[in-house]
Amino acid sequence: MSLGTLALVWVGLMALRTAFFAFHLRDPETLWHDFERRGLRYQVARGLDYLTLIAFGVAAVFALWGVTAQTPDRLWRVFVAWLGFLLLERLPLHRFPRTNCPGAMLDAQVSLGANVLIALLGAAAASALAAVYFAWRG
């Protein structure tokens, strides 16, 4: 699997998650009430989270399976695989924060920024470790 295909898989899975949330955003009070009670929408969101995480994990393993020190885009593949996995893991639908309370939108934005930053740092660290590994295996 190429780097572009892996990125398209991640974009498609994030679009699936976003479509689920956008579909239910017409009535956010009912959605958050259902999430608090762990109702059907919560269970579907949790199942979608696990499904997309597993699907991307399989795609990432498939993309990284044959990577060697001679593969030209090896570090970018590692970076995209880890970034996609970490973002899918750190931004679950079933834990989406409330945004309809005073100050909740700012809290949600800060949380989103922190999660994206941590995912970027994790992907950069994994790429640095991969670079060391590929240099050592040379």
Image (cartoon, rainbow, N blue to C red):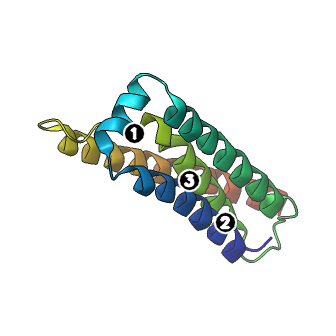
Quadrant where the N terminus lies? bottom right
Say which label, 1 or 2, has the lower sequence index: 2
Rendered residue at 47%/44% (across/down): 91
Give the CA distance from mark 3 to mark 1. 23 Å
132 w.r.t. 114: above or below: below
Q: Nearer the viewer, mark 2 or mark 3?
A: 2
Earlier in the chain: of badge 3 and badge 1, it is: 1
For mark 3, what is the residue?
A: 123
Q: Residue 16 location in percent, x, y?
A: 57, 59
Marks 3 & 1, CB-CB < 8 Å contact: no
The local secondary structure at tag 1 comes to loop
Mark 3 falls on what kind of element? helix
Q: Quadrant of the C terminus?
A: bottom right
Q: Please tell me which residue lies in front, 93 or 53.
A: 93
Q: Percent position (x, y) of residue 15? A: 53, 63
Residue type at mark 2 is Val
Q: Residues within 10 Å of mark 3 (few under 14, many from 20)?
A: many
**Separation of marks 2 and 3 at Cα, in angstroms:** 17 Å
* Residues at marks 1 and 2, CA–CA distance in whole angstroms: 22 Å
Give the answer, above or below, for where 32 lies relative to 85.
Answer: above
Residue bearing mark 1: 96
Q: Are marks 1 and 2 in contact (CB under 8 Å)?
A: no
What's the amino acid at mark 1? Phe
Q: Is residue 20 left or right of residue 130?
A: left
Q: Position of residue 96 (x, y in %)?
A: 39, 39
Q: Position of residue 92 (x, y in %)?
A: 50, 41
Which mark is drawn over residue 9?
A: 2
